[in-house]
Image (cartoon, rainbow, N blue to C red):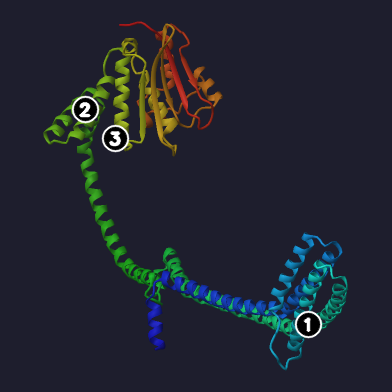
Amino acid sequence: MKSRLRRKLRSMRLRSKLSMAIVGTMILILSVNSIMYFILNRMTKQLDDIYIGNVKLNELEDALDKVESSMAGYLNTKGTDTLDEYYRAEQAYQDLMHGLEQRITDNQLKMMERDIYKMSENYLRLTDSTIDAKRGRNIERYRDEYEEAEKLYNYIKTYITSLNGYRFRGNTESYKALSTSLGYLEISSIAAFTVMALFNVMLVIMVTGNITRPLNELAKAADKVSDGHLDQVGVVKVHSDDEVGKVTVAFNQMVSSIPGYLTRLKESMEKEQLLKEKELLMETHLKDAHLKYLQAQINPHFLFNTLNAGTQLATMERADRTSEYIQQVAAFYRYNIQENDEVSLAQEIQLVDTYIYILNVRFSGDIHFTKEIESEDLLNIRIPGMILQPLVENSVNYGIRNIERTKRISLSVYSVDDNICISVMDNGVGMSQELIKSILNGEYANDPDSDKKHGNGVGLNNVIERLRLYYNGSNNFEIISNGRDQGTEVVITVPYAEE
């Protein structure tokens, strides 16, 4: 039975082991708390029962005093209010009387309760008779009966006081015994919680040891492998069939296969070395062809014609998306190799659309590009070529490329007085005022390799300089940014003149 249980524990998953330990601990804590609550609740009830008799006698004595005072009040005033008060007090006293012992018994305290009950009945008859004599103006009768009621009232008070004293002395002994029991309960609860805490600690140590022991052995073996001491790594012992055991089995298989892998790797390197020697013999023959190929690659017209051929091939093979992408790339390079220095604003915006399309193919549509054009008539103005695309490229490379939030670029065209404003705005990292001033003054110099890595070689300084030359040195280039992570807006202002 024991070996069967051990095998079952070995095959349990880590989650099941941890869950069993946690649930077992919670059940143990809940059981101990439930037992302690039951015992405390029982003792609290016993404590309430100890003094309930004294409380009832005190209530009875107060009700008796109320009957006496209300009767005296009526005899002095003979008012209807005092009479109503008397009847209410009498009814309350009768209700409390029914809680007294009425049977004959050998218990002295119960006998005193019965005597109080009988005297109370006589007392109430005398008070009722006194009230009736007062109401009937029979002065001699109500005086005699009032005196008898007073004597009986004093007897009842004395009996109640004596009975209350006897009960209090008896309850004191019971309270002492109950207090001693509570002390024992406190010690027992501390002992129980201590034992439970020790058991929980032992359980945690056992469960964590069962998990960490094989992991430590596996970690030591892995350290030897990482240090290159494969000959010192033996077979790691598998302690269980859980996740750690499966990892240990996989590790042992990996260690045993490493020598064979190294042998195959050595053979492969030797073969690769032979191939390299053969390749060196062919380098001289390939050099001329390779140079000619590079010359053809850097020829824009050759690249444009090659892209057109790729478009036709993609169309024939019904690769519509590929065909569209190649067409857009071809259109981008066709625009770059044209000889016109002056283009329409519509052509520049079309180039931006093509550029954004190509980027979104590369970056899976991460760039959200929007346009807002006040009027189509504004698109007819003539501006220098390659003005807007470098601005968008700059926003992508240095503004929004590395931000985590949604990447947004917006292009706006609107008129202000006799001028047209062209705005390119992004939500990227923004610019400092010092950097903006440096760019506008022509003092900022980019890394000479940065354009080759990220763009087409046309930077902000190039755009600013060409705009100044085209518009006779007027200041029509503005950079706006409110600081870090506040985005950047570039505004070009040109005079409005239709083609």
Q: What element carries label 1?
A: helix
Q: Where does the C terminus fall, quadrant-wise?
A: top left
At a point 31% along the width and 38% down the height, the residue shown is: 364
Q: Is residue 98 left or right of residue 458?
A: right
In which image quadrant can residue 147 be found?
Answer: bottom right
- Where residue 231 sits in the image (x, y, percent)? 39, 72
| CA distance for labels 2 and 3 | 13 Å
Tell me the residue that label 1 is attached to. Answer: 119
Q: In this view, does 107 lie to the left or right of 153?
A: left
Give the mark nearest the N terminus, 2 or 3: 2
| CA distance for labels 1 and 2 | 119 Å
Tell me the residue that label 3 is attached to. Answer: 361
State the residue lying farthest toward the bottom. 106
At a point 79% along the width and 74% down the height, the residue shown is: 129
The mark found on residue 327 in the picture is 2
Q: In this view, does 297 lie to the left or right of 96?
A: left
State the residue lying farthest toward the left. 316
